[in-house]
Amino acid sequence: MTARRFKVVSDAVIGASAVGALQALKVADRRRAADFVGAMMRKIGPLLKEHRVGRDNLRAAFADKSDAEIETILGGVWDNLGRIAVEFAHLDELRVAGLGPPTADDVVYSPQVKERAARILKSGKAIIGFAAHLANWELPAVCTKLIGSKSAVLYRRPNIHAVGDLVARLRAPLMGELVATGLDAPVRLARLLQDGVHVGMLVDQFFVKGVEVTFFGRPCRTNPLAALLARQTECPIHGLRVVRLADRNSFSVEITEAIMPARDADGRIDVKGTMQRITSVVEGWVREHPEQWLWLHRRWRPDDRRFSALSRGRAQ
């Protein structure tokens, strides 16, 4: 009982602190605050245990890079995270080229991307959009809502209720319908797709019950939901990518052409093969801008006990 009460109190304190921090960031100039927090995280990040995780991941993914090159990439990773923290409080202020007043644009795109997006909207068919933890990964959903399309986003609710409520309150007006991960999420998302709502999700994190794919030459497990939804609905799959530009405070957005799913002998979408194609696209993105990807989580877990137990269970 004492431990439970402590958790309730600590969660309340953390939640209140998060709310206060976001309120303080909201009144600050976004670009100046992002420059400051990004620089601060470059100094603090190497002191944290996640830095070692990122270093190990990078050494395995880029065996040809020197220690100095790896540390430079990790500096960019921490800088990016610091900027995201500031940008989250200002998502409603980010200006997308061609939308809103004719002022300096925070988010730009190429003519090819504009034509591709217009073609998708004109088709009248919902898409399954996948994204990765690159640059500011909140922006694909924000941009989708801004162009006027009906959209929904799969998201993982933070464990601390106060923080989760705050995140949902800030995201909902900007990103369309929020669908929390859970047992009913696949059914809800399939129904939304059938109703013409575009669905987006992140696909680059470890998922213990996922299908095995190869990422940077190493096996890992990924959530098969995007391919499962495609098999059920036959909706097209598109990649949505954000790249942080040279000034570190503005972005370009990209939409891929439809990713051709893998199919079995009967013509049905093959889930594992399709997730490998999606993962290969993400790998290409990460290789282009490794300093903008979240190397700090354990994407590969061959030594994970749950992973090993699951593998043994399926092999029997």
Image (cartoon, rainbow, N blue to C red):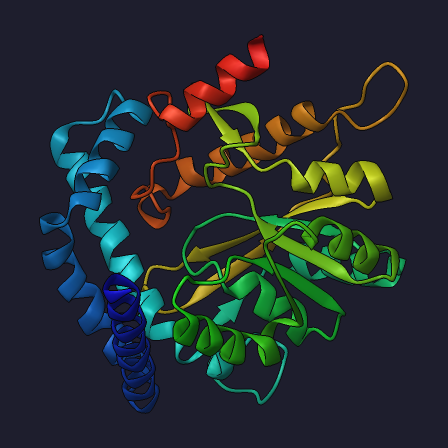
Give the camera-side residue of 281 and 178.
178
Q: Quadrant of the N terminus?
A: bottom left
What is the x, y in percent for residue 111? Answer: 65, 60
Left or right of 10, for residue 71 = left
Residue in the image at 79% along x and 51% along y: 190
Q: Quadrant of the C terminus?
A: top right
Using the image, determine if residue 10 lies above or below residue 68.
Answer: below
What is the x, y in percent for residue 171? Answer: 54, 74
Q: Is residue 110 in view from this perspective? A: no
Residue in the image at 75% along x and 70% along y: 149
Q: Total marks drawn?
A: 0
Give the camera-side residue of 289 and 220.
220
Q: Is residue 178 in view from this perspective? A: yes
Give the camera-side residue of 108 and 193.
193
Left or right of 193, for residue 165 = left
Residue in the image at 29% along x and 44% along y: 296
What is the x, y in percent for residue 185? Answer: 68, 53
Q: Residue furthest top?
A: 316
Residue in the image at 17% along x and 38% along y: 52
What is the x, y in percent for residue 245? Answer: 39, 60
Using the image, determine if residue 290 lies above or below residue 66.
Answer: below
| Quarter holding residue 11 | bottom left
